[in-house]
Amino acid sequence: MRDQGAGSPVIEARGLELTFQTSDGPVHALKNVNLLIGKGEFVSFIGPSGCGKTTFLRAIAALEHPTAGVLTVNGMTPEEARKSRAYGYVFQAAGLYPWRTIAGNIRLPLEIMGFSRDEQERRVRDVLQLVDLEGFGKKYPWQLSGGMQQRASIARALAFDAEILLMDEPFGALDEIVRDRLNEELLKLWNRTGKTIGFVTHSIPEAVYLSTKIVVMSPRPGRITDVIDSPLPKERPLDIRDSREFIEIAHRVREGLRAGHSYDE
């Protein structure tokens, strides 16, 4: 992967716009999005349903194509970044193949990329340990809880050691207790790996707890109404959510979400 150097943005959007053409007419998903994401940042995107959060993440991953503006990943186009294996992507559902073991699911992208068998085994072993699933490699997805399946999905995205991890509301379908635990584990994983993470969520507490930067978006067409640099320390126990600083940041996020509704179409 290309060395970014200190201060160089890993992801940069300038005047980014994206319009879908449908049978009912154009749908303006993103409008005039400007954003810099630095190396090692944990950036959450929050906004109402349909505001373009996932669309922006998919544009970074070259799964959607902007209709105006500039978007670069490691100084490359998203298509070039995809070919250079710059990122891993975690979807809302774990998306594990039921006929493959957990280790087999994690190994799949490594097989496609042509890694040697020994290297595949080493990487599978390392990421299973990283997400606290050591000993579960021979299990099948249906034998694991929903939270464990999502951890396996994260392990699969980490297996080829991309420096960027894109996560599209990976814990949205889980109950609050499991979600809290996975939030803690994800924060520890980010601290250990130093990866740049882009994270889509509908949860204000989740966004504030996890992030070094929170991007608040308006209803469609998606615009950025606020970018909040978090003053919270890197090490964050769950009870930090009761602190004054946490509550103040959450309040600012809510204000940004309210402000988004005042934008004219």
Image (cartoon, grey):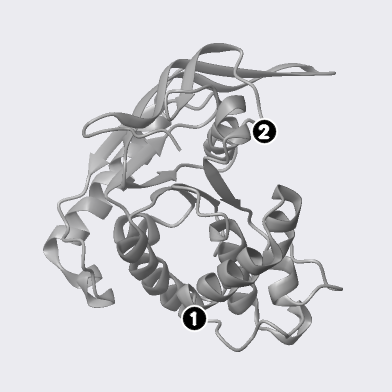
Residue in the picture at 70% in, 48% down: 113
Q: Is residue 135 left or right of residue 232?
A: right
Q: Earlier in the sequence, mark 1 or mark 2?
A: 2
The quarter of the picture where residue 180 lies is bottom left
| Viewer-nearest residue: 2 or 16 | 2
Residue 249 showing in the rendered view: yes
* Residue 253, disc: none
Residue, far top: 68
The quarter of the picture where residue 21 lies is top right
Check disc 1 and report the residue beneath it. Answer: 132
Residue in the picture at 46% in, 73% down: 130
Residue in the picture at 36% in, 60% down: 193
Question: Is 227 rendered above or below residue 165?
Answer: above
Q: Is residue 234 left or right of residue 223?
A: left
* Local secondary structure at mark 2: loop
Dot 2: within a 10 Å radius of its alpha carbon, few (fewer than 14), some, or many (20 or more) residues?
Answer: few
Q: Position of residue 127 (x, y in %)?
A: 53, 70
* Local secondary structure at mark 1: loop
Q: Position of residue 174 (x, y in %)?
A: 58, 72
Q: Is residue 37 left or right of residue 59?
A: left
Question: Is 141 rendered above or below residue 61?
Answer: below
Check disc 2 and report the residue beneath it. Answer: 63
